[in-house]
Image (cartoon, grey):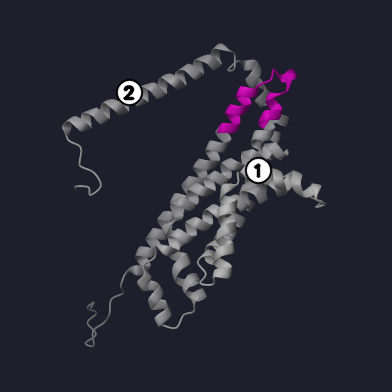
Amino acid sequence: MTSVLYDVPGPRARRRNIILGVVGLLVALAVIGFIVYRFADSGQFSERLWRTFAYPQVQSAFLSATLNTLQAFAAASVLSIVLGLVLAVGRLSDRRWISRPVGWITELFRAVPVLLLMGVVYYGLPSIGVQGVTPYLAVVAGLTVYNGSVLAEVFRAGMQAIPRGQVEAGYAIGLRKSQVTSIILLPQAVRLMLPVIVSQLVVVMKDTALGFIVTYNEILYYAKYLGSQGQLGSPIIPAAIVAAVLYIGMCLILSGVAKLLESRLNSSGRTSGARAPVRTPAGDGAAV
């Protein structure tokens, strides 16, 4: 099958691509090998440093930090999706006094770094008299505001990608704009943009690590604390490796769940789209 975007590579181009791929792989392996060598040469794989993770207290603390990370991720993910839907619907409103302010708010929060948002909530709100701001609240609020504004553009793009004829058909049968949005646009937009939504949720998962700046006891915060313990040999590199493995594992699980959900949605869409056989007046069961 020929492509409309680029010419199909010929024999020389395929050989060149293979050579470049092999060279790139060798370079990557060389860099990884050099890093592993330096770690081993500096004693980062010594039994003395890694013995720390055999202590039940350390394992329990890492488990608690992991649960804190998942707790912040779950809350921020749900709130980000809700906020994204609200902002997307508001930005698509026919009333300019709604769509324009929502558009300004969305662009503003997309441009502000997550770390700055967390800092404003945790350090800024108490300075103006707002009490009871915890590190957990600051992390969830910062992640929600930023990722909600990003997801708003994702949902808006998904809804605008739906063929206009479906919207007009909804209006033709007497649906209101809110019904067209909730019944026709949003379900299809979520299905259409599911890979992008999952990618953004992975970003939410990784950005929980920024919570260590506001002293939220998540994985990176505890890894940094553990690595600074001189009586344990300051195992900063081993602690960082363990934290990285935990983050990678959670992101892989999230991606796997998303792929399963996507396959279920696709299969349900094909099933619902199949036409049922229509019996003829003769009752012979022939499909029309």
Residue type at numbered disc 1: Leu
Which one is closest to the eye, mark 1 or mark 2? Answer: 1
**Which span of residues is magenta-colored?**
223-244
Mark 2 residue element: helix
Residue, disc 1: 116
Q: Is residue 86 visible?
A: no
| Residue at screen point 50% across, 15% down | 37
**Residue 17 position (above or below residue 26):** below
Question: For residue 87, what is the image quadrant?
Answer: bottom right
User: Which comes sooner in the sequence, label 1 or label 2?
Assistant: 2
Element type at mark 1: helix
Q: Residue at x 65, y 36 (%)?
A: 219
Residue 73 visible in the current orientation: yes
* Residue type at numbered disc 2: Val
> How far is the residue under mark 1 from the one under mark 2?
40 Å
What residue does disc 2 label? 23
Q: Residue at x 59, y 42 (%)?
A: 207
Residue, x 75% and y 44% (percent of image)? 123
Q: Position of residue 26 (x, y in %)?
A: 36, 22
- Quick check: is 243 in the magenta stretch? yes
103, above or below 65, in the image: below
